[in-house]
Image (spheres, rainbow, N blue to C red):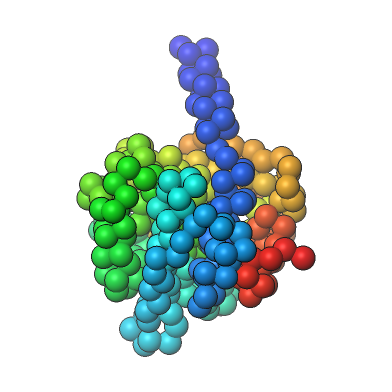
Amino acid sequence: MLFLKAFTLLALFATASADYSDFVARNILWPMCAASYSNHPENCIANRLPNTKLIKQITVPCDSAKSDDCSGFIAVDSKEKAILVIFRGTEGFVQLLQEGTSEIFTAPVKFLGGGVSPYFFNAFNQVWFGGLKDVFLTVRNTNPTFKVWVTGHSLGGSMANIAAATIASNGYAAAANMLLVTMGEPRTGNAAFVKAYDALNIESYRITHKHDLVPHLPPKLVNLYGYEHHKTEVFYDDDMTPGADFKVCVGDDSDKCSSASLLDVSINDHLHYFNVQVLDYAASGCVSK
């Protein structure tokens, strides 16, 4: 029995490792995450993905005080035959994390048979029902055979997680034809949500970078509402230059990847993925120095 369990885990690890594409994450989805931090994502698209067309960006106030914006956009990659759905959270999200997490990780709101952070859920809903849903469905009807790739960085990663669950659970796209890749995503929902999300069988990867603080929030040891991570973590323990090694950890909230060492957690590593600083990269139109 122990041998069978070990063999099963090994098989799962091998499958996840084989399926994860550093190329897609690095060269397609990360530039799109960076583009979401700009009011002109078409600049990144033109410089990095010439076969991709921006359809529409939606930017709306994402809190009741209307003090900060959330954003998302839809693009179509004709080469990959994929509809790209990208999210950006509030520009003040990192500052809010540095000040404390009590406003973010309150009692979860009901979603998908479990619960997610009301902060993340509200941010997603403001963008989704603020126009992105209609744009997505129109593009989906025009390209019914295209894959659906969903991504986001930081809070945008949590919004992307909720978006992928929304799209699959409502039948807007088949889960087997979807891909979720997030960068620096915090714990988005509770164990019941994670279980329900994993059961959708969407190919999903949470990329983490070295000592990035955000994926460890809220901390496991100070986590009143049971927030957990969905599968599968892809951990880069270096500067993420091209050809860098990475480790794939099968399971929902593994302690074998980024959680193996929680010393020297860093906001700087959160803002640097694939060897570029996300805000600088966005401002440059995704042109690497």
Q: Position of residue 253 (x, y in %)?
A: 50, 44
Judge by depth and name the residue closer to the eye, 130 or 117: 130
Judge by depth and name the residue closer to the eye, 260 or 122: 122
Q: Position of residue 132 (x, y in %)?
A: 32, 67
Residue 188's image quarter?
Answer: bottom left
Q: Position of residue 173 (x, y in %)?
A: 29, 46
Is 26 displayed left or right of 119 in the figure?
A: right
Q: Is residue 20 visible?
A: yes
Q: Position of residue 154 (x, y in %)?
A: 52, 63
Residue 94's image quarter?
Answer: bottom right
Q: Is residue 13 visible?
A: no
Query: Which residue is painted at 34% across and 71% down in the image?
Result: 127
Query: Which residue is painted at 63% across and 70% down in the image?
Result: 285
Query: Which residue is painted at 41% across and 71% down in the image?
Result: 57
Query: Which residue is painted at 37% across and 79% down in the image?
Result: 60
Residue 235's image quarter?
Answer: top right
Q: Is residue 232 above or below residue 105?
A: above
Is 250 displayed left or right of 57 in the figure?
A: right
Numbered label tally? 0
Q: Quadrant of the C terminus?
A: bottom right
Judge by depth and name the residue closer to the eye, 69 or 35: 35
Q: Is residue 4 above or below residue 288?
A: above
Is 81 displayed left or right of 49 in the figure?
A: left
Q: Is residue 27 above or below residue 234?
A: below
